[in-house]
Amino acid sequence: MISTILVGIDGSPFAEQALRMALEWAKGWSAAVHAIFVMRPEDLPGLPSSSAVYEGRDTSLAFVSRILESEGAEVEQRVQEIAGRYAWPVAMHKEVGDPAREIIACAKKVRADLIVVGSRGTGTFERFFLGSVSSYVVEHSPVSAVVVKEKGKSG
Ligand SMILES: Nc1ncnc2c1ncn2[C@@H]1O[C@H](COP(=O)(O)OP(=O)(O)OP(=O)(O)O)[C@@H](O)[C@H]1O
Ligand SMILES: [Mg+2]
């Protein structure tokens, strides 16, 4: 039985499709839905390098969390918009780190019994069927993981 679903969200239409699929399943199963958005330290705007994130711990952590808050706000708003359309709650998580590893860690934390991701994300490499995050999640997830594919596309 599936009672908790975790969805990886990166702001791409692929991830939004994965979220819609997860919400349909969650309603049918009465499952709780969590969504996680992970920012890579090197993607944080206004930082000269990712190492700055780790220097001077306290202040930089506060700084990073402020940036994450504003960057994540847009993604969270989209998530809540979609959740609203399905009239089903979604608990939002925002983290800084390696997306694939943070998704797995979050799945353990919320005791998810299903992870749902899109087949592609915001990346631009199209030589693979799956993006690096979805590949890693499928390979390392301790629970069942579903890769939602865009209708009518092989990649
Ligand atoms: N930063 C992230 N936070 C949360 N979930 C993510 C993140 N990045 C990707 N995902 C999840 O993984 C799915 C596939 O994205 P992935 O990053 O693997 O593909 P890509 O961006 O096309 O390729 P790559 O990043 O390897 O260039 C997304 O649809 C989303 O569900
Ligand atoms: Mg990506």
Image (tube, rainbow, N blue to C red):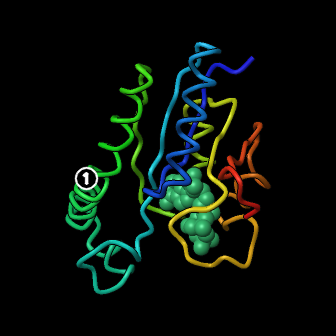
- State which image quarter holds ligand 2: bottom right
In the rendered image, the quadrant that contains the N terminus is top right
Frontmost residue, 154 versus 104: 154
Residue 27 locus on image (x, y percent): 56, 17
Say if disc 1 is inside 8 Å of ligand 1: no
Q: Is residue 36 visible?
A: yes
At mark 1, the secondary structure is helix
Frontmost residue, 53 versus 124: 124
In the rendered image, the quadrant that contains the C terminus is bottom right
- In the image, residue 127 above or below residue 92: below
Q: Quadrant of residue 143?
A: top right
Residue 102 locus on image (x, y percent): 55, 53
Residue that sits furthest to the front in the current view: 152
Q: Residue at x 63, y 24 (%)?
A: 25
Residue 9 locus on image (x, y percent): 49, 50
| Crowding at mark 1 (Cα within 10 Å: few <14, some 14-19, many 20+) | some
Q: Type of residue at label 1?
A: Glu
- In the image, residue 106 above or below residue 43: above
Left or right? Give the position of 60 relative to 49: left
Left or right? Give the position of 33 relative to 154: left
Q: Residue at x 54, y 48 (%)?
A: 8
- In the image, residue 114 above or below residue 151: above
Q: Residue at x 58, y 43 (%)?
A: 18
State the residue position of label 1: 69
Q: Is residue 100 visible?
A: no
Residue 140 locus on image (x, y percent): 76, 53
- In the image, residue 59 above or below residue 25: below
Q: Residue at x 28, y 59 (%)?
A: 71
